[in-house]
Amino acid sequence: MVSSDQRRRQLAREKFERQQQRRAAAQRKTRQLTAVIAAVVAVVIAAGATAFATGAFDSDGKKKGSDAAASPKPSATPEPAMAIDKTAKYTFTLKTSQGDIALTMDAKKTPHTVNSFKSLADKGYFTNTKCHRLTTSGIYVLQCGDPTGTGSGGPGYTIPDENLTAYGKAGADGTVTYPAGTVAMANTSAAHTGGSQFFLVYKDSKLPPTYTPFATIDAAGQKVVKVVGAAGVAGGAADGAPKKAVTISKATVTKS
């Protein structure tokens, strides 16, 4: 017999996956519109189309324009060429409005993911972006990495799933436990659809083993995320924008 707690976790997982699917649909529509606009602009002037499609960064890695968080990010671009040491570990440091969060990434286990995050961080992609989503029931995560803050934004390319067996085989309920301190890729509920969005687990959470776990949070960072989780969601819901707003002022990836 299924307990009420198990049923609650199941409903939370199902809601999480439905929202991922809705965000994926919205992202596909955005990409289609971008492609149409880029094609029209290309007829007029190819250079302008290129700047629009790639998002055009300044030489210091910051987005051009007065509002970096709201400006279009790279779209319709290929996955970055491999430019990291696949045998090394890297530190992904987030300077946020609630405190610094350091994430340790193992390139040997997740080379595509680490390489993508280093490429994006080096370009200032995460500068002045918000962690747009917090869940506080059944699944306990803080989700970040969307420059639009809507849950539908991404870099315009996808990366392959990696390290999906890190927590063993799924149980009878189709899930594994993502331990507190894990950082994993968000996706569109389909294989190999990770982009720039990721979530930080602040309490053990049961999820299908379809989200690439690519980093662990340092002790100080875990305290930061737990405080945000304890404050809850704005408006009192169990899923939505965190009451304690988390803005990433700077993100860097360095070889450990």
Image: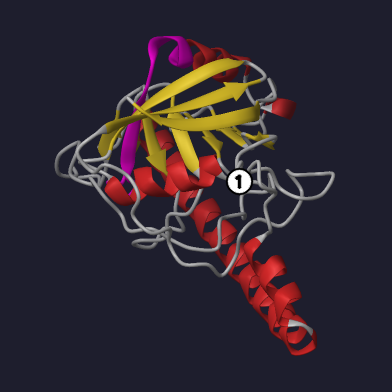
Q: Residue at 26% of width from left, 50% of height from top?
A: 162
How many discs mark residues in the rendered view?
1
Quadrant of the image occupied by residue 72: bottom right
Camera-nearest residue between 9 and 176: 176
Residue 8 placement (x, y as % from top left): 43, 35
Quadrant where the C terminus lies? Answer: top left
Label 1 crowd bin: few (<14), some (14–19), many (20+), radius 10 Å: many
As shown in the figure, which amino acid type bears the numbered disc 1? Asp
Furthest-front residue in this view: 59
Q: Residue at 14% of width from left, 44% of height from top?
A: 169
Q: Residue at 62% of width from left, 55% of height from top?
A: 152
Badge 1 marks a residue whose secondary structure is loop
Camera-nearest residue between 75 and 222: 75
Residue 107 placement (x, y as % from top left): 27, 40
Camera-nearest residue between 26 and 121: 121
In the rendered structure, does residue 215 fall within the stretch colored magenta? yes
In the rendered structure, does residue 43 fall within the stretch colored magenta? no
Q: Residue at 44% of width from left, 42% of height from top?
A: 118
Residue 86 placement (x, y as % from top left): 23, 43
Q: How is the image coloured?
A: secondary structure
Quadrant where the N terminus lies? Answer: top left
114 displayed left or right of 128: left
For the record, the magenta segment spans 208-222
Furthest-right residue in this view: 66
112 shown above or below 181: below
Furthest-bottom residue in this view: 43
Residue 112 placement (x, y as % from top left): 32, 51
Task: Read off the residue under disc 1.
Answer: 146
208 shown above or below 232: below
Quadrant of the image occupied by residue 205: top left
